[in-house]
Structure formats: structure tokens, C-alpha cells
Image (tube, rainbow, N blue to C red):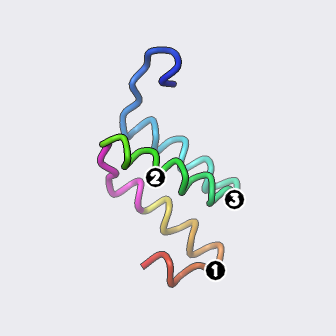
Amino acid sequence: MEERDFEPNIVAYNTVIGCLCKKGSLNEALDLFSHVTVNGIRPNIVTYNCLIHAMCNSGQQREAT
């Protein structure tokens, strides 16, 4: 997205994070989450819900809290 001079907002990132979580790519979703926060974009409740749900589904309940 950034390569095409498009500055994605949290809604765009949430869409990608949600898709990664649904396909079982939790590590990629967490990497993207790190990218989001490092670049000064504030995650919202949707961001956290996607990640928490994916962590719980993958047996990482402790990490989700």
C-alpha cells in the first residue's frame, strides 16, 4: 500500500489483519500489528478483537490476556 503512495489507516490494516487471522497466519498478523504500532497508527477495538480471537483459537489464551 505504501509503495503506491497510499497511506493506509487502521481500517485498511484491520482488514488485512483480520484476513490473516482467519486463514491461520497469526504470526504474520502479529508482525503487521507491530508494523502498525511502530508507524504511529493507533490500533482500535477491532484490531485487538481480531488478534485476541485468533490467539484463543490457536491455544494461546494466556498470551491473549
- Tell me whether circle 2 and circle 1 mark residues in contact (CB < 8 Å): no
- Label 3: how many Cα within 10 Å (few below 14, some 14–19, many 20+): some
Task: Give the amino acid at mark 3.
Answer: Gly
Q: Quadrant of the C terminus?
A: bottom left
| Numbered mark located on residue 14 in the image | none
Q: Label 2 vs label 1: CA separation?
A: 21 Å
Q: Tag 2 or tag 3, which sits nearer the N-term?
A: 3
| Numbered mark located on residue 59 in the image | 1
Q: Which residue is mark 3?
A: 24
* Residue pictured at 48% horizontal, 68% vertical: 52
Q: Which residue is mark 2?
A: 34
Residue 10 image offset from top left, x and y in percent: 37, 40
Residue 22 image offset from top left, x and y in percent: 64, 55
Q: Tag 1 or tag 2, which sits nearer the N-term?
A: 2
Residue 45 image offset from top left, x and y in percent: 33, 57
Task: Give the amino acid at mark 1.
Answer: Gly
* Residue pictured at 62% horizontal, 50% vertical: 20
Q: Is residue 14 above or below residue 65?
A: above
Q: Secondary structure at mark 2?
A: helix
Which region is colored magenta? 41-48
Q: Secondary structure at mark 3?
A: loop
Q: Label 3 vs label 2: CA separation?
A: 17 Å
- Label 2: how many Cα within 10 Å (few below 14, some 14–19, many 20+): few
Q: Label 1 vs label 3: CA separation?
A: 12 Å
Residue 3 appears left or right of 45 = right
